[in-house]
């Protein structure tokens, strides 16, 4: 197994540990979850670059890499809906999940037609912003709740109730835009007569 595929498998293996530390109440659990999520995000940035640079692209990597990305992001967003400190609802999670299913379906149709659907600018922007939003949220949770810095209550309320949800909603908006771009670009593959 080549290095990019090992990095992808590492990302998959880190997801349960991320979830465990988001839920258990050990000291500095948000900080540990932040480190795990950040490490997983770094493997996401590295595996594709290494695979393309060293000509190590495999079918296994083509299958597992996007799946690992989706499971990592959706796991974090799902956990955010359950954290009482921040107020992120399920709607952005549903929007982002629906887009991922739609793009996966388009990729399947494209593959059946011999067309490769490459990640576009909007898809990359969506992924980068979503990762940054999740990491920023985890940094906030760690600073505020792990370390218990004495911050003004109004600031805590503003970040918990407004800033973090806004970051997630921007991710959802970018997700919608990138999904529409994919849909427009590959609409010809969706033919109700076929």
Image (tube, helix red, strand yellow):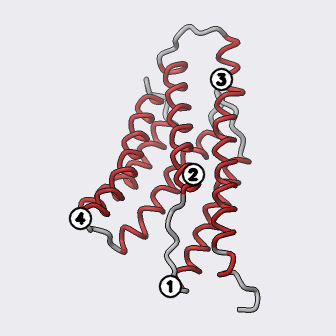
Q: Are marks 2 and 4 in contact (CB under 8 Å)?
A: no
Which of the labelled discs sits on residue 159, or is there none?
A: 3
List x then y, in percent, for residue 193. 75, 91
Q: CA distance from mark 1 to mark 4?
A: 26 Å
Q: Viewer-proximal residue, 152 or 193?
A: 193
**Residue at the limit of the structure toward the right, as seen here:** 192
Locate the C terminus by quadrant: bottom right
The nearer-to-camera label among 2 and 4 is 4
Mark 1 or 4 closer to N-term? 4
Give x and y (percent) for residue 45. Answer: 38, 50
Q: Is residue 60 above or below residue 148?
A: below
- Residue 42: percent from the left, percent from the top? 37, 45
Residue 87, which numbered label?
Answer: none
Which of the two labelled residues, at mark 3 and mark 1, occupies the earlier sequence position?
1
| Residue picked out by circle 4 | 2
The CA distance from mark 2 to mark 4 is 26 Å
Disc number placed over residue 74 in the picture, else none = 2
């Amino acid at each position: 197994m080549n290095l990019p595929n090992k990095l992808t498998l590492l990302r998959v293996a880190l997801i349960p540990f991320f979830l465990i530390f988001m839920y258990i109440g050990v000291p500095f659990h948000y900080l540990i979850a932040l480190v795990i999520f950040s490490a997983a995000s770094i493997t996401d940035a590295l595996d594709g670059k290494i695979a393309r640079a060293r000509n190590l692209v495999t079918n296994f990597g083509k299958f597992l890499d996007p799946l690992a990305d989706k499971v990592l992001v959706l796991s974090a967003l799902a956990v955010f809906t359950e954290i009482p400190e921040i107020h992120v609802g399920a709607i952005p999670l549903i929007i982002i999940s629906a887009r991922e299913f739609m793009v996966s379906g388009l990729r399947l149709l494209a593959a059946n037609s011999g067309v490769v659907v490459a990640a576009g600018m909007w898809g990359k922007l969506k992924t980068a912003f979503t990762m940054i939003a999740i990491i920023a949220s985890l940094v906030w949770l760690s600073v505020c709740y792990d370390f218990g810095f004495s911050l003004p209550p109004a600031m805590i309320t503003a970040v918990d109730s407004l800033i973090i949800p806004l970051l997630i909603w921007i991710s959802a908006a970018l997700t919608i835009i990138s999904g529409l771009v994919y849909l427009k670009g590959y609409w010809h593959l969706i033919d109700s007569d076929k």
